[in-house]
């Protein structure tokens, strides 16, 4: 049985809303809201921007039911101080908690494949390969929708295919274009780190993964490409890679590259409440 952080009685028919407040090496934070649950994944934007962003989407740090952390890198925890001051429940792996010296109070620890219930959301941690102590990605289940947040990983494991296939909203890292990384200004050790099994996923790997995962199905998920490199990628290249890979398997889906330093248009489990995303045409 997954551990329960907040009451989970009754079913909600209200939509799930997901908002990326920022995505990339300068900061990551994703807000998941239902009528009963306010959950933040990573608090990697500065305290002022975090509180302003939360206010913009109708909530506050104090109103959060929990903050779940993927790993300890500063682009995921920069705004953690006010979260801790407010006594918001923290969910992370033991490795992330010890890397951040989080102590025991108000903290829930999970490992890969553990699930925890937060209000009307069930969140499952997935192990990822990344140069952090014990990094994870998260999958979310709600009566109305399934969402997958899979960023900061250097190697795509085929065990993720089923999670992608089941998701209504897929948030997948599409960090760099291989050519831009190779020919770009990063020093050799940094190029090796980004491209390594402990670094970040390239456009091609992300695109291939999505195509393999949803190629055989008939559902049309929304795809958000996240954690794009400012130096080694372009939003148009990331989107084009995924759209092209999907076209090869006969699929068309809304594909969006997330903004780096600011919020991106949100997603709702109710299609009528979704901002219009142009479905890219088959190339
Ligand atoms: Zn990161
Ligand atoms: Zn990282």
Image (cartoon, rainbow, N blue to C red):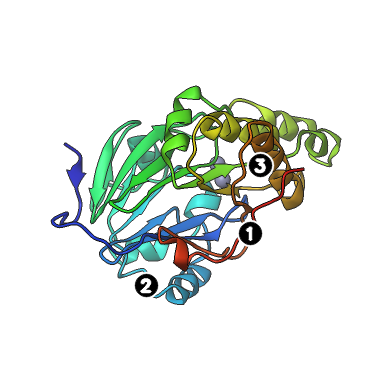
At mark 2, the secondary structure is: loop
Which residue is at 31% across, 67% downward? 86
At mark 3, the secondary structure is: loop
Q: Which residue is mark 1?
A: 259
Check the image and report above or below for 128 versus 10.
above
Residue 24 in the image: x percent, y percent?
61, 51
Q: CA distance from mark 3 to mark 2?
A: 30 Å
Q: CA distance from mark 1 to mark 2?
A: 22 Å
Which residue is at 32% across, 44% downward? 123
Residue 240 in the image: x percent, y percent?
73, 44
Q: Upstream in the sequence, badge 3 or badge 2?
A: 2
Residue 175 in the image: x percent, y percent?
66, 42
Q: Upstream in the sequence, badge 1 or badge 2?
A: 2
Residue 182 in the image: x percent, y percent?
82, 33
Q: Which residue is mark 2?
A: 60
Query: Where does the N terminus fall, quadrant-wise?
Result: top left
At mark 1, the secondary structure is: loop
Label 3 CB, ligand 1: below 8 Å?
no
Q: Which numbered tag is attached to residue 175?
A: 3
**Label 1: few (<14), some or many (≥20) within 10 Å?**
some
Q: Quadrant of residue 137?
A: top left
Query: Where does the C terminus fall, quadrant-wise?
Result: top right
- Closer to the eye: label 1 or 2: 1
Q: Upstream in the sequence, badge 1 or badge 3?
A: 3
């Amino acid at each position: 049985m997954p551990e329960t952080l907040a009451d989970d009685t009754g079913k909600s028919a209200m939509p799930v809303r997901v908002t990326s407040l920022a995505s990339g090496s300068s900061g990551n934070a994703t807000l998941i809201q239902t009528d009963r649950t306010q959950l933040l994944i990573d608090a990697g934007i500065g305290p002022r921007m975090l509180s302003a962003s939360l206010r913009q989407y109708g909530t506050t740090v104090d109103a959060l039911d929990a903050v779940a952390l993927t790993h300890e890198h500063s682009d995921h925890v920069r705004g953690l101080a006010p979260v801790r001051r407010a006594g918001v429940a923290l969910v992370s792996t033991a490795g992330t908690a010890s890397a951040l010296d989080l102590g025991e109070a108000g903290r829930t620890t999970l490992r890969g494949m553990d699930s925890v219930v937060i209000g009307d959301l069930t969140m499952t941690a997935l192990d990822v390969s990344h140069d952090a102590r014990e990094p994870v990605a998260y999958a979310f289940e709600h009566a109305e929708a399934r969402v997958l947040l899979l960023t900061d990983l250097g190697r795509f494991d085929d065990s993720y295919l089923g999670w992608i296939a089941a998701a209504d909203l897929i948030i997948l890292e599409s960090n760099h274009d291989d050519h831009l990384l190779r020919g770009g200004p990063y020093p050799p050790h940094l190029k090796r780190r980004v491209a390594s099994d402990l670094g970040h996923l390239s456009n091609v790997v992300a695109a291939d993964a999505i195509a393999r995962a949803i190629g055989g199905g008939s559902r049309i998920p929304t795809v958000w490409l996240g954690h794009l490199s400012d130096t080694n990628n372009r939003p148009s290249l990331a989107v084009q890679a995924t759209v092209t890979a999907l076209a090869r398997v006969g699929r068309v889906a809304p594909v969006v590259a997330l903004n780096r330093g600011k919020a991106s248009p949100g997603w709702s489990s109710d299609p009528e409440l979704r901002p219009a995303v142009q479905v890219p045409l088959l190339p």
